Image: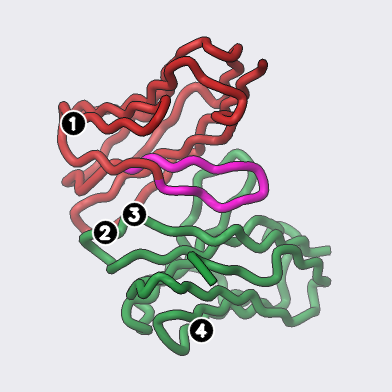
């Protein structure tokens, strides 16, 4: 196992469903991130965890709920989503939150479609 | 507020036709400028970090340079495998990272 692994790679859900995205990193990093990527738009930071503690929540709607049980695993729980939430959700990790915060290692993403 | 603007949005090159991508930025206390490559259906892959004006970094056919207001990613004699979207991001003194929207590069044989 290497790098950052995300599952599932593709997810289709209705607006009333509950689903979760999973991310696992095998790099020994201390910081983990969730980003949202929509077509033609810059990456949007959603959540940051540093040493398992949430350090940032960029005004993300409560229908997105992150969970970080340890420094290697990160989840994004999804509930009552809207069609405009359809996007590529990227997990990333970095050695730490500040000094190497720009050198991110990304997973391949979870492509979410909300019907 | 930090801002990052990449141009052009898209670039179509013939194999061997060198070109440059631009990333202009405004940031409070530059902590680093970062270049990434993203292939379709995949996550971004880290390429370079530049810390101060005048710094240059090279990797194969790619060369990144930095001034006080912008960064350039030069692609020398590109090959079809250089086709990708190239993203730049700036980090500020607060640890915030702001990405640009990217430049999609297509290199045709």
User: What's the CA distance linking mark 4 and mark 2?
Assistant: 23 Å
- Disc 1 is placed on an element classified as loop
Q: Position of residue A64 (x, y in %)?
A: 59, 75
In front: label 4 or label 2: 2
- Name the residue rendered at 38%, 79% in the picture: A54
Which stretch did the figure color magenta? B34-46
Q: Earlier in the sequence, mark 3 or mark 4?
A: 4
The residue singled out by tag 1 in the image is: B55
Marks 3/4 in contact by CB < 8 Å: the verdict is: no
Chain that bears disc 2: A
Report x, y in % for residue B4: 37, 37
- Is B41 covered by the magenta stretch? yes
- Mark 3–mark 2 CB contact (< 8 Å): yes
Q: Residues within 10 Å of mark 3 (few under 14, many from 20)?
A: many
Examine the structure image and report whether residue B28 is included in the region drawn in magenta. Answer: no
Q: Which residue sits at x=45%, y=73%?
A: A26
Q: Which chain is green?
A: A
- For the residue pair A35 and A60, the one nearer the viewer reads as A35
Mark 3 and mark 4 on one chain? yes
Give the colour in which the image draws chain B. red
| Badge number at residue A67 | 4
* Residue at the image point whose x is 67% and y is 16% from the top: B109
Instruction: Name the chain under label 1.
Output: B
Q: Secondary structure at mark 4?
A: strand
Q: What's the CA distance linking mark 4 and mark 1?
A: 39 Å
Q: Separation of disc 1 and disc 3 at Cα?
A: 17 Å
- Residue B51 lies left or right of residue A18; in this view the side is left
Contact flag, marks 4 and 2 (Cβ < 8 Å):
no
The earlier-in-sequence mark between 4 and 2 is 4
* Chain label for disc 4: A
Which residue does the numbered mark 3 point to in the structure image?
A: A103
């Amino acid at each position: 196992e290497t790098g950052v692994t995300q599952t599932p790679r593709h997810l289709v859900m209705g607006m009333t469903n509950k689903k979760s995205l999973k991310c696992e990193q095998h790099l020994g990093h201390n910081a983990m991130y969730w980003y949202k990527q929509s077509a033609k738009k810059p990456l949007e930071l959603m959540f940051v965890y540093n040493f398992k503690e949430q350090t940032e929540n960029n005004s993300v709607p409560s229908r997105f709920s992150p969970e970080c049980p340890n420094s290697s695993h990160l989840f994004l729980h999804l509930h009552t989503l809207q069609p405009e939430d359809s996007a590529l959700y990227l997990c990333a990790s970095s050695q730490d939150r500040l000094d190497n915060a720009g050198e991110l290692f990304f997973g391949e993403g979870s492509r979410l479609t909300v019907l | 507020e930090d801002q990052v603007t990449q141009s052009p949005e898209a670039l179509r090159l013939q194999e061997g036709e060198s070109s440059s991508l631009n990333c202009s930025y405004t940031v409070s206390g530059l902590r680093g400028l970062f270049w990434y490559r993203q292939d379709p259906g995949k996550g971004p892959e880290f390429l370079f970090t530049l810390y101060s004006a005048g710094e240059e970094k090279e990797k194969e056919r790619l060369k990144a340079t930095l001034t006080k207001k912008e960064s350039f990613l030069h692609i020398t004699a590109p090959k079809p495998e250089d086709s990708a979207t190239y993203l730049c991001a700036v980090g500020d003194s607060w640890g915030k990272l702001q990405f640009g929207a990217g430049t999609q590069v297509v290199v045709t044989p």
